[in-house]
Image (cartoon, rainbow, N blue to C red):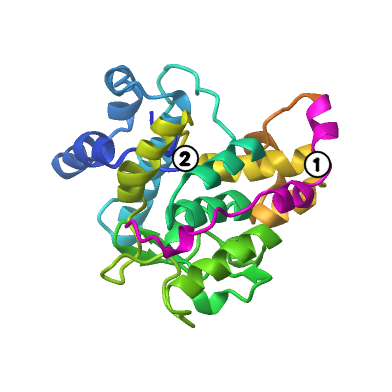
Amino acid sequence: MPTDAVSSPPESLVSGGLTLRASHSLLSSSTFSGNCFCEDADIARQHNLSRSTLRHIKTLLSGIFKQAKRLGVLNGVNPMQDVSVPMSKASSETYAYSLEEVQQMIGALPEPAATIVATAAFTGLRRGELRGLLWENYNGAQIRVTQSVWESHITEPKNKQSKAPVPLVPLLTGMLDGYRLARNNPKSGLMFASRKSTPLNLNNLLNRVIKPTFAKSGLQWHGWHAFRRGLATNLYRLGVSDKTIQAILRHGNISTTMNIYVKSVPADAVAAMRSLGEVCTSMHQPAGKFGERVV
């Protein structure tokens, strides 16, 4: 399963597999059973899905049937209520970018990729939140998330905590200010926009710019969400409290922050990285980058 997949199952699988099977059963029978999911272990084998991904799919289907009950389309109990998840492979270990890797990425990438990667790495924003950032919500010290963009759809942030302002490190502020100035100093509108003034397609940026650059530089790509995990892990390495990390990532539950996002690191790594700010100030933006327009 791709590293970028975090909380929702692959769209092709849902639209082409499970949802169609569930929908067909629902429409053709008033006694639909969730067994079409729990007994169909070949789904996991065919698509090489982990048990965690199957749980996400079960949650999605449960939500669909819950809405169907509200609309009066489905009578009785939610068919997914007593469904068990079929046995499948264990979830693979997720990745968190180190601060050293982020430094190498920023140094190798052209604009706007360098600033976008720096924003992802030093704010921990989700991919949809990055695409929805607005200049009017940036004041040089922090940035507020007021919308999220998935494909071409603009939605509300994930939850109430996601709307909290995100503090910015000086390095990122400097990069954003330079990037803004190179684009005629806009006061409002999308921070990362395409030539058509639509939210920048990060998949295009990844395939056309980031991956080719990484291949030449010997860097590895582990997905956008690895920046979010990386921020949590790097802050933990610096001795930042669990509660503060939770606030920066804007999680509603501290156990999510510590159990999923923070990756264990050797004790000597903590001593080697006393402060995120010290390392950030040692990083510099190569001259001439802000004059380039790539995507």
Residue at the (30%, 49%) spot, across then down: 204
Identify the residue position indicated by label 2 in the image: 6
The x, y position of residue 2, in whole percent, is 39, 32
Q: Residue at the location (49% across, 72% down)?
A: 180
Quadrant position of the N terminus in the picture: top left
Q: Residue at x 32, y 18 (%)?
A: 41
The C terminus sits in image quarter: bottom left
Tell me, yes or no, whether the highlighted magenta stretch contains residue 134. Answer: no
Please indicate, yes or no, whether residue 61 appears anywhere in the rendered image: yes
What residue would you read off at disc 1?
238
In the rendered picture of this protein, how many numbered marks are placed on residues?
Answer: 2
Q: Is residue 83 above or below residue 102?
A: above
Residue at 54 percent across and 68 percent down: it is 178
Rendered view: 74 above or below 182: above
Query: Which residues make up the magenta segment?
Result: 268-295
Against 165, residue 261 (above or below) is above
| Residue type pointed to by label 2 | Val
Residue 207 relative to residue 192: left or right? left
Q: Position of residue 50 (x, y in %)?
A: 43, 24
User: Tag 1's secondary structure?
Assistant: loop
* 181 relative to 96 in the view: left or right: left
Secondary element under disc 2, as helix, strand or loop, is loop
